[in-house]
Image (cartoon, rainbow, N blue to C red):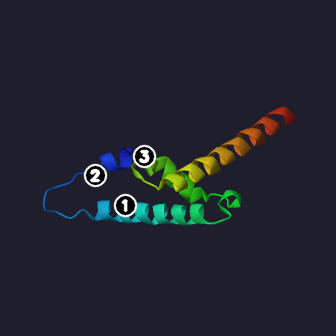
Amino acid sequence: MSDKLNNIILFPGVLNDQLQELETKLLKTQKLIALQMDDPNWDVMPLDDIIIEQLAEYGDVMSFKDHVARRLIACLATELGKQRQYNAEIKYEY
């Protein structure tokens, strides 16, 4: 589980605004990812930096349908491959 979620203390019978705000934010991100991955052109749509940051922070507590998860993995792997290629090209320019 994410460190951010582990830092929230839950008291019985008390609503935690911070937790509700975080859960709302995560649900919005999950819906946005699902919409993007359900699009017919999912493989050519770049992932927003905010989505990547939220996946890095909270990806372990998010859940997706199987096909959405597979497509998301493919997109993330593509982004990682591009970044590695870019870094390798810069390394050899010096």
- The residue located at (31%, 61%) in the rendering is 18
Q: In this view of the protein, which residue sits in the foreground, 92 or 28?
A: 28
Question: Gap between marks 3 and 2, in whole Å?
Answer: 16 Å
Q: Earlier in the sequence, mark 1 or mark 3?
A: 1
Q: Is residue 29 above or below residue 75?
A: below
Question: Any mark on residue 8, and which?
Answer: 2
- The local secondary structure at tag 1 comes to helix
Residue type marked 3: Asp
- The local secondary structure at tag 3 comes to helix
Q: Earlier in the sequence, mark 2 or mark 1?
A: 2
Q: In this view of the protein, which residue sits in the foreground, 5 or 94?
A: 5
Where does the C terminus fall, quadrant-wise? Answer: top right
| Residue farthest to the left, as pictured | 13
Q: Which residue is mark 3?
A: 60
The x, y position of residue 40, in whole percent, is 65, 65
How many marks do you count on the picture?
3
Q: Earlier in the sequence, mark 3 or mark 2?
A: 2
Residue type marked 2: Ile
**Of circles 1 and 3, which is in front?**
3
| Residue farthest to the right, as pictured | 93
10 Å crowding of disc 1: few (<14), some (14-19), many (20+):
some
Residue type marked 1: Leu
Contact check, label 2 and label 1, Cβ < 8 Å: yes
Q: Which residue is mark 1?
A: 22
- The local secondary structure at tag 2 comes to loop
Question: Any mark on residue 78, and which?
Answer: none
The x, y position of residue 93, in whole percent, is 86, 36
